[in-house]
Amino acid sequence: MPDLTSVPLPYRIVLLYIEPVAAFNGAILAHFFPSYYLSGMSPSATISTYSSPSQVIFDQLAACYFLFAFNQAVVLRSTSDLRVWKAMVLGILVCDLIHLYGTWEALGAAFWDPRRWRVEDWVNLAMLYGPGGMRFAFLMGVGFGDENALAASRKEL
């Protein structure tokens, strides 16, 4: 097993444990409970909005969530190379930004007004802003300590 102590503990906890479980949960919801997933992501959708011909889209989304879970739970554990970690974290951050755009499209003006958010919106946005901010901090080297080693790893990415 690689020595992952070069990655600060808070990042390891989130990236190796919390997020893979959350992504796996998203895969389960998208595949097995697509009407629930749809109504949770879009305030204009209802459980009756779902139609079975669109199941393929939910299955493909579930596959992407499963890939995130696998990459974080398995691939990141297989290496201590910070270049691999940074590439993976950057890719997920890009996905977060696209997800935020989709949420903005779905919520409209309510996106900017937390008083109008539903419980589902709070969960959705908390799972984007919290880990997304953590990913940004990871890529900026927050918490890594040794500036010389950090500068070298930035150049390698």
Image (cartoon, helix red, strand yellow):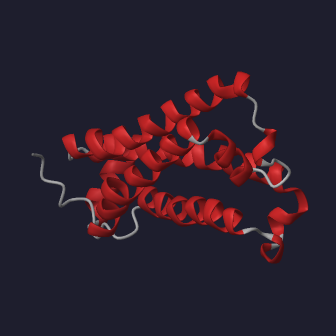
Query: Residue 108's spot in the image, x, y percent?
Result: 88, 56
At horizontal 47% and vertical 57% (from top left) the residue drawn is 135
Q: Is residue 79 visible?
A: no
Of 130 and 83, which appears nearest the observer?
Answer: 130
Tell me: 63 left or right of 42: left
Q: Residue at x 64, y 47 (%)?
A: 37
Determine the residue located farthest toward the bottom in the rendered image: 115
Q: Position of residue 22 (x, y in %)?
A: 45, 54
Q: Is residue 108 above or below residue 53?
A: below
Counting labels gives 0
**In this view, 143 is above or below 54:** below
Q: In this orientation, does residue 117 appear?
A: yes
Of residues 115 and 84, the one nearer the viewer is: 115
Q: Quadrant of residue 128?
A: bottom right
Give the quadrant of residue 75: top left
Choose between 149 and 108: the one closer to the eye. 108
Point out the residue furthest to the left here.
1
Residue 112: x and y in percent read 82, 67
**Residue lying at the far right of the rendered structure:** 109
- Is 5 above or below relative to 89? below
Q: Which residue is drawn at the image coordinates 44% and 55% (left, top)? A: 139
Residue beneath the point at 30% across and 46% down: 73
Locate the C terminus and report the quarter of the image it occupies.
top left
Pinpoint residue 5: horizontal percent, then vertical percent. 17, 61
Q: Determine whether, in the image, residue 89 is placed left or right of residue 148.
A: right
Q: Please state if 115 lies on the left or on the right of 30 as rendered.
A: right
Quarter of the image with the N terminus in it: top left
In the displayed structure, would residue 122 be above or below residue 23? below
